[in-house]
Image (cartoon, rainbow, N blue to C red):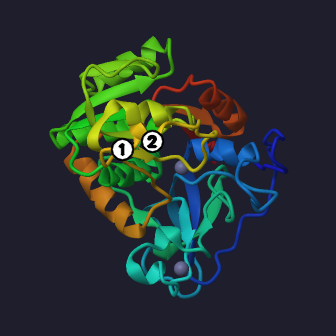
Amino acid sequence: MLLDAPGRPLRAADIPTPVPGQGQVLLRVHACGVCRTDLHVADGELPRPALPLVLGHEIVGTVVACGPGCGRFGPGERVGVPWLGWTCGSCRYCLSGRENLCPEARFTGYHLSGGYAEHTVADERFCFPIPEGYPDLQAAPLLCAGLIGYRSLLAAGDAERLGLYGFGAAAHIVAQVARHQGRRVFAFTRPGDGPAQTFARDLGAEWAGPSDADAPEELDAAIIFAPVGALVPAALRAVAPGGTVVCAGIHMSRIPEMPYDLLWHERVLRSVANLTRRDGEEFLRLAPAAGVRTAVQPYALERAGEALAHLRGGEVRGAAVLVPAVG
Ligand SMILES: [Zn+2]
Ligand SMILES: [Zn+2]
C-alpha cells in the first residue's frame, strides 16, 4: 500500500520485492500494526517522508533471505521491526545510550520502507526477536505502542498514581504493565467514549472518565498519548507537586498558553521521543513476564486506508493490525 503524497489515500500497488542490502534481512510480513504516527505521516504533519512511501513500523515477519554481512538472524526466524530503523552509531547521542535522539536516525515507514506490504527489508541490528507466546497479530502492537508506552512509563518515574490520557493502543498495554508493577491507573478518554472507559476498567484502571473531568484524586504522573495540546495544562492540573507529565506522541496540536502556577512546585513536563534498542530488549522481556495481552482489530492489508480512518475516528479498541493475504 503506497502513500504517493500526504493527504492522498493509500493505493494498492505492485512493486518489486525488495532485495536485502548489506546487513539487511528480507522479511515476509505476517502482520503490521497501525500507529497514530502513520496518520501524522499520511496527513503531512511530519516533514519530508520518503515518497512514495510504504507506511508501517510495527512489523512482524519471518526472514526469507539475508543480505551480505548478516548473521544475527537466519531464514525462518520470526522478527519484529520497530520505528527506529537505523542510526549513525558515532554521534554524541549514539555514543551515550541515547540513539533515539540521533540526528541522522532513519525511521521505518517514514524514511525507510515499512510494513504495509507483503515483504520488506530491515537492518537486522535494529530488529528484535519476538517473544514466544505472542501470535503475529498480538505481537505487532508491542513494537511501537508497547515500546513507546514503556519508555513513557520509565519517564514517569516511580509514580504510584498514574494518569493515562487517550486510551488507545499504547495506553492499553501500559495500563497492564503499570498494574503489574503495583501502580494505580486512572484513564482519561475522549468525552462521551463510554466503551473506551469500560475497556480501560477491564484492563485494570480503577477509574476511567472523560478528559475534561477532574481526576478523583491527585496523580503522581500522567502520560499523554492523545495528540491534543489542550491536555497538557489539564494533566499538569491533575498531578501533585513534584509530579511529571510525559507527552508520548510525535506530534501534538498547539499547547494553550497557561499560568506558571501549573508548573510551579517542581512539576515536570517532558516528551518522549522514539526508542532505543535497549528499550526494545527490556520491554520485550517485560511484556510476557507482566502477562501483557494485546487487543487487536485485524484488517486485510488492502483495507489500510479504512484502518487509518477508524484510528482517526477513535473507533479502534486496542490496536489495528494489517494482515497481508497469505500467498
Ligand atoms: Zn547518531
Ligand atoms: Zn508508532
Q: Which residue is mark 1?
A: 264
> Can the viewer see residue 135?
no
The residue lying furthest to the left in this view is 182
Residue 211 vs 120, above or below: the answer is above
Q: Residue at x 79, y 49 (%)?
A: 3
Label 1 is placed on what type of residue? Trp
Mark 1 beta carbon near ligand 2 (under 8 Å): no
Residue 36 vs 270, above or below: the answer is above
Q: Which residue is mark 2?
A: 260
Label 2 is placed on what type of residue? Tyr
Place of residue 78 in the rendered image (x, y in percent of width and height, measured from the top left) = 43, 60
Question: Which secondary structure lies at badge 1?
Answer: loop
Q: Residue at x 47, y 47 (%)?
A: 248
In the picture, residue 263 is in which quadrant?
top left
> Can the viewer see residue 156?
yes
Place of residue 223 in the rendered image (x, y in percent of width and height, measured from the top left) = 39, 41
Judge left or right: residue 109 versus residue 212.
right
Q: How many marks?
A: 2
Question: Quick one: label 1, few (<14), some, or many (20+) residues within 10 Å?
Answer: few
Judge left or right: residue 297 versus residue 251.
left
In the picture, residue 54 is in which quadrant?
bottom right
Place of residue 290 in the rendered image (x, y in percent of width and height, measured from the top left) = 21, 45
Question: Which secondary structure lies at badge 2?
Answer: helix
Q: Residue at x 41, y 37 (%)?
A: 262
Q: Residue at x 51, y 21 (%)?
A: 190
CB within 8 Å, label 1 to label 2: yes
Residue 285 vs 324, above or below: the answer is below
In the picture, residue 128 is in which quadrant?
bottom left
Viewer-nearest residue: 303 or 111:
111
